[in-house]
Every structure is written in structure tokens, then in C-alpha cells.
Amino acid sequence: MTAERWRQVREVLYAAAEQDAAARAEFLREACDGDAGLREEVERLLAALDESGAFLEPAAPAERDLSGGKIGPYLVLERAGQGGMGTVYRAVREDDYRQEVAIKLVKREVETEALTARFRRERQALARLNHPNIARLLDGGTTADGRPYLVMEWVEGTSITEYANARKLGVRERLGLFLTVCDAVAHAHRNLVVHRDLKPSNLPITAAGAPKLLDFGIAKILAPEAGEEEAMTVAGGLALTPDYASPEQVRGEPLTTATDIYSLGATLYELLTGVRPHRFETRTPPEIERVVCEREAALPSAVARAPGVGASALRGDLDNIVRKAMEKDQGRRYSHVDEFAADVRRYLEGLPVLARPWAVGYRARKFVARNKALAGAAAAVVVALAAGLGLTLWEAGVARHQREAAERRFELARRVADSLLYEINDRIQDLAGSTAARELVLRRSLEYLDALARESGSNAALQRDVANAYVRAAMLQGAPGVSNLGNPAAARESLGKARSLLESALAAAPGSAEIRRDLARAYRESAQLGRDGAEFERHAQAALAIVEELRRERPGDAGVLGDLERSEFTMARSMAAQARYGEAAAYYRRALAHAGAADAQNVALDQKSLGAVLFKMGELEDALKEYAAATATDEARVKAEAANGRAKLDLSYDYADTGLILLRLKRVDEGVAMYRRARELRVQMKAADPRDARAASALVSAEWRLGWALGVAGDRARAGEAFRRAVKGAEEMIARLPDRTVGMRALAEASWNIGESYRQQRGSCAQAVLWLERARGLYRELKVPAPRVEESLAACGGK
Amino acid sequence: MAGVGVTALLLDWSNGDRGALERLMPLVYEELREIARRHLSREDPAHTLQSTALVHEAYLRLVDQKRVQWQNRAHFFAVAAQLVRRILLDHARRRHAAKRGGAGTVLTLDEGLVAERQRALDVVALDEALNALAELDAQQARVVELRFFAGLTIAETAEAMGISGATVQRDWITAKAWLFDRLKGSGRGAG
């Protein structure tokens, strides 16, 4: 293309891009005036533009004000506001100037496809919401550049709290407004729509003096809850207003009508007192979670400062009503909005309200719960052990005077669960075909744990134990790097339970360092299982925040220091998982600074992880230094504990990775020597325990890596020998180990690499294809997708 | 580093002293490289953020905010954009070279760590495409440089280049289409 032609294309392209999609064809016909080549060029570039999305866009694109322009069939009058999810415009329909609408234009970064799908799904439910106090959702669509928008009834008004304060309304008038809001929310709930983001600014009072609820169901469209179809994005999480968000909401749990009741309670709190229920030191997720989930708001009467409302009017019943609506535990809130409203009405009519003074009721419940926990736990043991005798005992009644006996039995329940999770599982996990048995053990354990969790009430010690057992269960279910049952979704669920138990344990024992350390560990484990880099990072961050705070409180605590190192390590891995290597390196360095000299294994792991990141950044010399440090650490470990197989294995990895770096640095002979050392160690390990599947796999891998290195050095004969040893070793594994698949994986990997060696190092596709097809067959049998093998085959087939 | 010196050079240059630019560039380059070394790096679409953050940090460190106006800021960023592009390119080339080194593409670290995969924006390919665009229209390539590598807004880009915002907008939109189209096919050797 010439510069002149480009100028021509550019002019037409730019003008066409400004047109509506519908008008483009007509425009192009005219503008190109028979020049088919021009038209084709412009159309291709227009398609590219539509597709380009955020390509090259600066990180925070300045939102262009669309006032005076058009969104779909609407004429935009003015920009009315900017929120977390996008911009709100006031607009009118082109063909009906009388009806003003509010258009929510979703931010560019929001994943639009899923959003459009959710919109379609939710739309019918929202259409049923026909209530005079609910602003209607009218329409929705997609702009020419692909951004979804929602169209709602335009509401002119001031927020319920501002309205009440500006007019200095008294308690009865404020409650009157609030009851209208409750009716509207109840209507939505009956139609199975949960608001999820109730707050004063979504509750404007119109000029007519009536509340009009905004954004019903919108939160669900804009930010699906965790687990629904994708994890809530960080942006989605932050978009929520923490002042009115329920504990389950900030924890990212599934949301029900109980969440709206909480938010209504928080709104009533502010409406009656003039202040918000919570104060946040910072608006970081961990701080928000801590405050919302743990801190009890002050009683409304204690903070009353709304004009026209005295503290004395709030003391007693209204304190209790607000408190009940804002209970941390969903089960203790009003069960319906109607029930909530009815209690407010009873107050207005001077009748006794349902909500009881908090402290006394809480204590009584707590007492009952404690005994119930013991009884329930005992029952679990009894059922599991199928002991008729025990059942009779329990039926005889675990009364208060039998508490000690109950406690003993409860202890037994705990031990059974422990034993199942630890001893029994560990004993059977290496047995051939034990997977089904292990799954059964796990399922039973989880049944115990679920029962114990349900009955744990507010017994912090019990909750903590159960939570830690859940963490252990999660590791068996699917933690990476541990022999596990490969079910990460189930593992995530267990970890979620562990976290929420620990949260409530922490509420019962505020500030407990032990519980916080457990919680940080649960977050670290959750991080490793994150569905994506963002979730990995979020949980790692939460763990780190907890531990850093502990560290400030207890600078001399070695246990906390160890937790800090582990949390920084996890954080680093979350960065590396997102290819943010610079940040990963920084966290590894911090972890290294906090690793105790006594914990050589962690020191070495920090060093080699840092080396691996530097390697990926292309900083080969620096990477080499870190691996040298790791090697020195691991060599000392091997020397100190000759029988420690783990240390030997770790050291063999140091040698192999150092070998790779040396090859990249073109120091080929040194590289080969390193691979030889790695192999030598693994030969020793396999000899020590021929039935150890891990050692056998490691040796196979060392053989073909050595073969590759020898290939780089040009030593075909020795390379061939190493490859043959790899294949022989893997075939032996298949024949001799109880689980055939371990050997099959080793053989598949070896075959692929041997094939690649033929292709890349010897230029022989004929030979390569034989090995690559063998690899493909094995991967298919294993039902493991192997795109890289396919790529290799394609590379050969193409020639 | 001499914050005062950079600020004075920036003001001189903004006032039309061509020579000031010659002396300014190496100072900014050194600082950027130093920051880049610390932050390095990820070669993914989020490069935008990273390179923008890089320039911001350099600006905060080198320039005395009290003595300059937003126009000077735009000029500084304009200088930095070019340098950041060079730094990122050097870095990407080094990485490519490392990847192509002795061991071929198969052998990876023997580490037991999680594998990472991210659709990467190929800085090298982008650089080549930008050079090709510059041959068609140098001004347009410069607009992309300022927007993408320094994160300048339309208005700032217009100020830094002494052209109208409408022109920047046109250049930007059409360059984006052209580059996207070209890079989309670059994996298969088009263009």
C-alpha cells in the first residue's frame, strides 16, 4: 500500500466507523464509488476495529462523554453519573421524546458476552416486577462498538436518607417511608428477584414523596456471584458498597433474600441514626471483610444524630429490630421482608416486637448451641459406629449433668474424623486400586465434618478443629503437588467451609492469633486452587494481609514469621501464574528475607523459585546465581540428613534446572555435566526404593533430559543410549507399579521429547513421527489432551 | 538523580530549545531502564499498564511537579514513550534470543511449579508493524506510541504533538484497526 492510498482508505474508514452499523453499507457504497478494492480494504479494517476491543487501549481509557450522541434508539441528553460498572446517562427515545430513561452503559473492560447472556436470562424475571415503587427495566441492547447497556425508567429524586434529614422527619415518618420500601422489596422477592445492592442511593424519594427503588436485579446481571458461572471479578467485588453489604456478600458466597434483609437493616440503621453502621479504616477487601463479618455495629440509640430523631426513641425495640435485621448469621435475621415490616408495624402500633434484646437472647442461644453441639457430635459417632448401646445412651438424654460424658464422646467423634482423614488415608493411599476406598473414607469424613460444623454453634475451639480438618480434606481432594483425588471443585468447597468456620470462630474469639493463622493458611491453600490468576492472587493477598497484621502485633513470634514467608511465597506464585514475573521475583526475595536459616527446605525452594522466574524473564546469569544458592542449600541438607530422600530429590532438580540454564548460555558441556549429576542422584533414589513411583518417574525424566542435552552437544550415540534408558525405565514402571497410568505418563512424555529430538536435533521427521504417534496414543489412552504433541506432529506433517 | 536538572531541561525544551532535548533523553532513558529493571516484567497485553506505570514513576522521580504545567508533562511523556518502546523491545528481543538458545523449544525447567500460559502481545511484532505504519504515515505511528507506550490521553497527545484532538482521534482509531488487522495475521506470516 502506498502512503497516498492509505490516506484515502483512512478517511473512508474513519467516517464509516462513526456510522451506525446499519448505516455503514449505504455509506460505503457511496463513499467508495465503485472502487471495489477500496471497499474491501475498508470493510476488512472495520471488522478488525470491531474486533479489536481493548487492543492497545491505555489502561484507564477516558470514558468519552456520549451526551448529544446516540445509544441504540435513544438520544443521550446528559451524563448523569459514573459508577463502578459504567456510566449512567439520561436519555429519551428517538420516537418518543416524552419518556425519559436512564441508560447504564457498561464499562469496556466488562466481559460482555456473559453479561448479555445473563441479561437475556434475567429479563423475564425483571419484566414481572410491576410495582409502583420499583423503577422498571425497560430495555437493553448493545452499542455499535459492542458495549452492552441497560435502559431503566428515569427517576428524579433524592436518596431516602438525604430526603429525611433535609426535612428533619421524625421517627414515625421515616419508618413510614421505610415500610413502603419493604413492600416493594417483598414484591420483588415474591417474584424471585433479589436486589443485592440495596442502599440509600438506590432508594430515591420522588417529588411526589414516594420511594422508587432503582436497579432491581441489576447487580445480578452485572456481577454474578462466585461459582455461578465465573468468579466475581475484582472490579465486581469492589463495585459493591461495603457499608450495606452483608457478611455473606463480602465473602463472595451465594446470595439470597436474607442479603436484602441485611441491607435493608443497614439502610434503616442509617435512616434512623444519620450514620452508617460500620467504619472502615481502609477500603481493602480484607479490611472490609473483617469489619463486616466480625464487628458488631454500635446500637442505633448509642449513635443517634439524625435531625428530628432522638436517642430515646430508638432505645429498646428499634435497637432490637435493626440488630435482628443485621445479624451476621443469616439464620437469625428476619426470615422474610414481610416479617421485618410486620415488626416495624408492631412497633408503630405500640405492640411488643419479635426482636429480642440482643445480649440475653444471644447468651441463651449460645448456651443451648454448645450443648447441642456436644450432643450432635456424640450422635454422629454413635451412628457411625452403629453401636446400639451408644444410641440408647444418647436417647437417655445428654442432660447438663452428663456434659462431661458428652464431651468425651464428642472428643471421640473428632478423633474418628481425624483418624479417617490422616491415618487411614495415608496408609491406603499407595495401595493399588485404593482410589475408590479413599473416596469413601473422604466422603465419610466430610459427613462427620458437615455434622460437626452444623452443630458447632459458637464454640470457637470446635469450629477451629473442624475447619482444619476441612483444610486437610481439601488437600486430599485436590491440592496441587499432593497425592490427591483430583477434584479441585470439591476441594474449593471444603476450603470455603473451613474459611467461614474460622471466620465465625474468630467472631467468638476476637483477635485470636491462632485462629487468624489458621485462616491465613486456609487462604493460602485456597489460593493454590484458584480458578484463575486473579482468584489465586486475591486469596494469596488475603492470607498475606492477615499475616502482616499478626507480624506487626507479634514481631518476635517465629511461627508468625514462618507464616509470613509462606504467604509471600504464595503471593509470588500467584504473580508468576499470571506471568507477572517482576512482581513474582520481588515477593520471592521478600520470602527469602523472612525464611529462617533453620528451615533450609523453604530457603532452597524460595531460591530456586526465584531462579525459575528470572529464567523466564531471560535474566539467565541472575537465574544461575539463584540456582547456585539453592544447590548449596540443598547440598547441605543432603549432607546433614543422608536418609532424607526429599532433599536428594530437591537437589536433583537444582542440577537439572542449572543444566538447562547452562545450555541456554551455550555452556553446553557444563550443562551436560549437570544433567549427569541429576541423573546420578535419581539412580540412587530409585535403587533405595524400587517401588517409589515418584523416584522412578523422576529418573525417567532425568534420562530423556540428559539425552536432549547430549543431543545439543552433538553426541548422538550417548543421547540415543539415554533415550533408550528412559523408555526402558518407563516400560518397567507400567509393568511393575500398581497404578499403570504413572508409567504411561512418563512414557508419553519421554516419547514426545525423543520425537522432538529427532525432529529438531537430527532433522528426521520420519523417525520423529513414530515417537510422536506413540506419545499421542498414550495421551489418548490417558484421556489427557496433548496440544503440544499435536503441534509437533503438524510441524512434521507440514514438511 | 538530578531532579532539578531534568525539570530545567524539560522547561527549556518546551520553550523551544532543541538542544535541551539532546541532554534530556539520556537522563530519562537511564531512569526508565533502572525502573524497568526493578519492575520487569511481563509480556502480555497488560504491558499497557506496566509501561504507563513506568513512565509515571520516572516522571515523579525526575521532575519537580511544582515547577511544571500539564503541557510540560505531556512533553516529558512524549520523550518517554519512545524510550519505553525501545526498552520493551530490547527486553523482548533478549527473551526471544534466550528462547531460541541452544536447547531448542522443548526442554523446560524441571521445576514442579505451576505452568503459566498467557496470550502475549508480541512486542517485537508490534514494533515491526509500527515501523511499517510509520512508512505510511509517521505522525500516525507517533500517536500510537504516545497513547500506548506512555498512556497519554487524546488531549495530551494532541498537546505533545501540536496537532488537533480530532486528528489524534482519527489517527488513533484508524491506526488501531490497521495494526490489529496486521498483527492478527502476523502469526501466519502475513504482511
Image: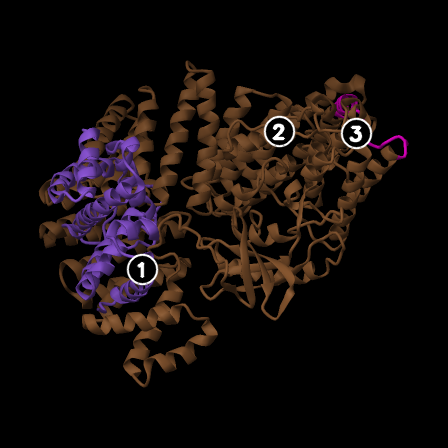
Between A582 and A652, the one lying in front of the other is A582
Residue A339 locus on image (x, y percent) = 81, 41
Q: What element carries label 3?
A: helix
Q: Which mark is residue A278?
A: 2
Q: Which residue lies furthest to the front in this view?
A: B15
Q: Residue A318 carries which label?
A: 3
The answer as to whether the residues below labels 3 and 1 share one chain is no
* Magenta span of residues: A349-367
Does B84 appear above or below A151? above
- What hue represents chain B? purple
The C terminus of chain A - image quarter: bottom left
Query: Mark 2: which secondary structure?
Result: loop
Q: In which quarter of the image is residue B182?
A: bottom left
- Please report, as a chain letter, where disc 1 is located: B
Q: Residue at x 44, y 35 (%)?
A: A540
Of A613 and B188, the residue lying toward us = B188
Residue A417 appears at what percent x and percent y? 60, 32
